[in-house]
Image: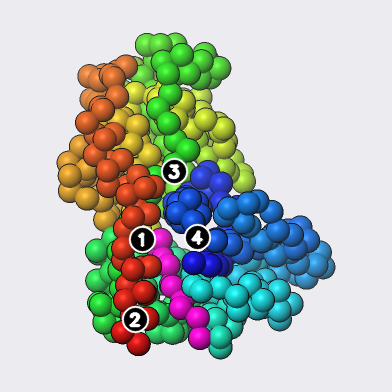
Amino acid sequence: MRICIVDTFRDHNPASGGHAIRVFNIAQWLSQQGHSVLIIRPSERATSIEGHEPRILSVGAGGRFARFLRAFQVRFFPRMRHFEDSVLMNTPRTLSTLRTHIKSADLVQLEDPTLLGPLLVAKLYRKVIIADTDGISSEVAREMVNLASPRVQPLLAYTVILLCEKLWFRLSSKVVTSSPGDKQMVSLLHHINQEKIVVVPNPFDASIRASKPMARASVRRALGLSAETPVAVFVGDLRAQHNLEAVDYIARMVTNFQSFREHNVHIMIVGQFDTMPKEWKIPDLIFTGPVRDLAAYVSASDVCIAPLFSQPSGIKTKVLTYLALGKPTIATPMALIGLDASVRKYVLECTAADFPAVLLGKLTRDSNSAPNDALSATVQSLYGVDAVGRTYSREVLASIHVKAERA
């Protein structure tokens, strides 16, 4: 089958987070099963195609137009990271490039509700259209309205995204969500028959492999930490609002909870960030930026943390990564949305108020504990790329074949 995936993400590096991990890992699995997969995404460079399977078509924009879009976003929609890319993927020039690839595809998968141009082109050529959603965009946008109230820009952005989402779901052949809760929310929010909606969970990154003890020791030495230092780790792209909020909370927690200083607790923050607020410049916080071997940094920690307070949908791949490596994990309820109960039971779940004491207790009790192999195996069986790929094949591809045969 020829599958065309259209996205608004410029980079599908795992460091970009859950959406990037979902798209690329499913595309790679489909390629390994013999399907011809093309990912089309925006780029700062000129239009080019690269790779073997999956292939990647990067669609570029003129420098002047790109600068205008960036300035417009900063002025009117500063929190919408993908505004520029959404506009770029809907321009006549881009649609002209996309038309040939969409026309020759058997299935067109769209990764964002703002991709109305590609949606209408696919509809024009009567293609099977998959609306794939890591999380419900309108619910995330609604949170931004609540945070920024009573400003007009977030409300306008929410309204536009809600309308785009409604059209996206209505015109698609199948809607794919990452959890049963999201399936129910989509059905209620947009009045869509649940038979049209299927659940394909987020996978954890296929490139993540458990590190050897040597790698753990090497990371600690590089960061100036002894083997006895209690260390926690938080992983996430800090350009995303929910991760930004989490690090703000972590900085306040470290500053205000005196017992952390008494026990020499350090917290690693692993992920991309644009700026460093002065509130984050605390000796006990270590910002690594993006890292090549994420597993080594997670393994170098004693405990993994996910104090999330927004992003109300989509399975959090940071939590999957922690658990896939068998690490002790502490998280707020928001970080565990959609997680299977057989895996969720391994997580220490607590509120923001209890988080510091729970974390300190875990660090002082379980320092240097060995990875939980039973937990790793359970996560692999549910959220490994092969397991998720088989679910995609069964819930999406097989259902499309059945529908075509009936027609």
- State how many labels appear: 4
Q: Given contact means CB atoms under 8 Å apart, are the residues at marks 4 and 1 in contact?
A: no
Label placed on residue 405: 2
Instruction: Please state, as top left, top right, bottom left or bottom right, where the C terminus lies in the image.
Output: bottom left
Q: Can residue 2 be seen in this view?
A: yes
Image-based side of 366 in relation to 243, left or right: left
133 vs 355: above or below:
below
Q: Do we see residue 238 in this rendering?
A: no
Q: Which badge, 1 or 2, is on the more N-terminal residue?
A: 1
Q: In this view, does 324 lie above or below 259?
A: below
Q: What stretch is highlighted in magenta?
A: 126-135
Q: Which of marks 4 and 3 is nearer the N terminus?
A: 4
The residue depicted at 31 percent of the width and 58 percent of the height is 391
In terms of secondary structure, where does tag 4 sit? Answer: loop
Q: Is mark 2 on a helix, strand or loop?
A: helix
Provide the residue designation for mark 3: 205
Q: In the rendered structure, which disc, 4 or 2, sits on the residue that comes first in sequence?
A: 4
Q: Distance between the residues labelled 4 and 2?
A: 20 Å
Say if 125 sits above or below 218 in the image.
below
User: What crowding class fits label 4: few (fewer than 14 Cα within 10 Å), some (14-19), or many (20 or more)?
Assistant: some
